[in-house]
Image (cartoon, rainbow, N blue to C red):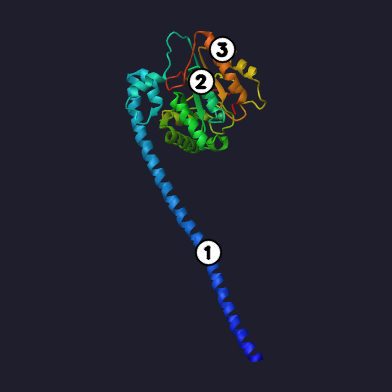
Amino acid sequence: MAGISEAEHAARRKRVQTLKKAIILLLILAILFPVVLCMILLLKINSLEQRIDELSELVYIKQKSVLTVDMEDTMNNPKSSVGFIMEQEGTADKGNSDEKSVPEEEGYTRKVYLTFDDGPSQYTNEILDILAEYEVKATFFVVGKEDEKSKEALKRITEEGHTLGMHSYSHKYNDIYSSVEAFSEDMIKLQEFLYDITGTWSRVYRFPGGSSNTISKINMREFISYLDEQGIDYFDWNISSKDASSERLSTEQIVKNCIDDLETKDVSVILMHDAAGKRTTVEALPIIIENILAMGDAVMLPITNDTEPIQHITNHEETEE
Ligand code: ZN
């Protein structure tokens, strides 16, 4: 009896051992299979990304040659200024689109450029609604935001005739001002991203912190030279809403900051922000526009490469956020 039991036990142990081995093998396979699959997919993604980069480069080079032709065209025909800055995809009717984008300048002695930095944001659509209501064109110096709402806002900015300017992809001072290479990489990333979304090549730039920022360890003239080589103009501002200050300004204060010095300037570039927490800027905007309209001799225009540049060269007290 005990002998049979012993043999049975041995057989059972063997079966259990075999079963154990089978389970362990299955477990190993269950772990290995997804890991191997992931590795294959990662390799695939990598090669596709490389392919996308190559294709983007090709598109970029192709577009650049189109722009060069367009620039020559602009010199012969100064009226086609917007076509030079904002090359639209498939612009067969380029001549017409130029005319519609530039508001009438004649009869006005002052030019005012409304500019919004750091967008798109939760307020972009409201800002665009206000601008549309007053039929005013402005300039948005945007950063790289890839969510769907931001992409829609970027499209709307260009579709409604505003200028889409660049304000760096990352807006990280330490990165973009670490070297000309890093600056260039960041700018091209933003320029290509904006082109992919809107079909528009942005040709205007605003430095984060302005050209006179005191954060960059590298002489800003190096970045300015780089932009020059790329045919990109940079714009600072000569009127600040000061809405980037750490304390939130009241609507009245923002209006005052924007309009107080307007009478003293023939060309005003007003700095505002299209950014989270800047609700009072949105509230101030219609009042600012109405004040400018009331001047009677001022016209509000979008920035183009023909716009007389307002550029900081020396240090200034204020730093834009
Ligand atoms: Zn900024």
Could you tell me which secondary element the residue under label 3 belongs to? Answer: helix
Ligand 1 found in image quarter: top right
Could you tell me which secondary element the residue under label 2 belongs to? Answer: helix
Real-space Cα distance between discs 1 and 3? 70 Å
Check mark 2 vs ligand 1: CB closer than 8 Å? yes or no.
no
Q: How many labels does the image show?
A: 3
In this view of the protein, which residue sits in the foreground, 127 or 227?
127
**In terms of sequence position, does the residue under pointer 3 or pointer 2 come before the other?**
2
The residue positioned 44% from the left and 8% from the top of the image is 107
Residue 291 x/y as whole percent: 56, 12
Task: Tell me, for residue 30, which label it has, or none.
Answer: 1
Q: Is residue 143 above or below residue 79?
A: below
In this view of the protein, which residue sits in the foreground, 26 or 225?
26
Task: Tell me, for residue 273, which label it has, or none.
Answer: none
Q: In this view, does 284 lie above or below 6?
A: above
For disc 2, the marked residue is 131
For disc 3, the marked residue is 291
Horizontal side of 43 relative to 265 (left or right) equals left
Check mark 3 vs ligand 1: CB closer than 8 Å? yes or no.
no
Q: Which of marks 1 and 3 is in front?
A: 1
Residue 77 x/y as whole percent: 33, 18
Q: Is residue 211 visible?
A: no
The residue positioned 37% from the left and 18% from the top of the image is 99
Looking at the rendered structure, the kind of residue marked 3 is Asn
Q: Is residue 143 above or below residue 41?
A: above
Could you tell me which secondary element the residue under label 1 belongs to? Answer: helix
Q: Which residue lies furthest to the front in this view?
A: 1
The residue positioned 60% from the left and 22% from the top of the image is 281
